[in-house]
Amino acid sequence: MLRSVVFDIGETLTSDTRYWGDWARWLGVPTHTLSALVGAVLAEGRDNADAIRIVRPGVDVGAEWRARQAAGQGDHLDETDLYPDVRPALSRLRAAGLWVGIAGNQNAAVSGLLRGLDLPADGIATSAEWGASKPSSAFFDRVIEWAPGEPHEIVYVGDHPANDVAPAKASGLRAAHLRRGPIGLTTTAPDADWTVNSLAELAELLTAP
């Protein structure tokens, strides 16, 4: 029996297209160039922020992000950033009696932006608010404290096998691998309880009688 479903954010609920486009404009490089660099560092198993460090060697990415904020070019989210299956899938899960949470590696500003979208979710949290980020066990301990149910009654959903699926399983949660975005489409997660191509597919599986 399942009681809760908790979703990653980037490339699970929201597209990263705007995020990297905004960074490209700030760095003064074509969006395609930065996107290609992101793909290259991810293929090597590196932090995607290394793409920014390639463009600006030695840069402090956190400091650069704060400079963007100060210049009025900080993070932004609106309805167009959501994948089209998000609202229907989350609504279907809630209608079936499941508690729906959203928790991922994001700065605290994203929490407010997500809450402003009035998504059909029972809770929203970010790694910045929790003081723990994926793939650390501390992040998934917070998921277990936060979401109703025993660990085996909670499903964590994400696109990244190493950041989402493997650590969720190691913490005793169930896990769904979403084949979405550059990581989700180019990696496999053999230990996932479910592998799906859309949130609509996942919602159908989790609410089947």
Image (tube, rainbow, N blue to C red):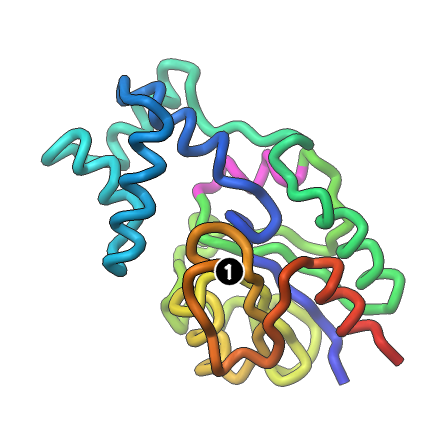
User: Would you say 98 lies left or right of 133 here?
Assistant: right
> Which residue appears at 43% of the width and 48% of the height?
128
User: Would you say 52 lies left or right of 203 here?
Assistant: left
Q: Amino acid at mark 1?
A: Asp
Q: Position of residue 180 (x, y in %)?
A: 54, 55
Which image quadrant is residue 152 in? Answer: bottom right
User: Would you say 86 lies left or right of 15 here?
Assistant: right
Magenta-colored span: 107-115
> Which residue appears at 57% of the width and 75% of the height?
175
> Which residue appears at 87% of the width and 67% of the height?
96
- Vertical order, 178 against 47 (above or below): below
Q: Is residue 110 magenta?
A: yes
Q: Which part of the image, by quadrant, shows the N terminus?
A: bottom right
Q: Position of residue 95 (x, y in %)?
A: 88, 61
Q: Is residue 71 visible?
A: yes
- Vertical order, 37 against 130 (above or below): above
Q: Which residue is mark 1?
A: 159
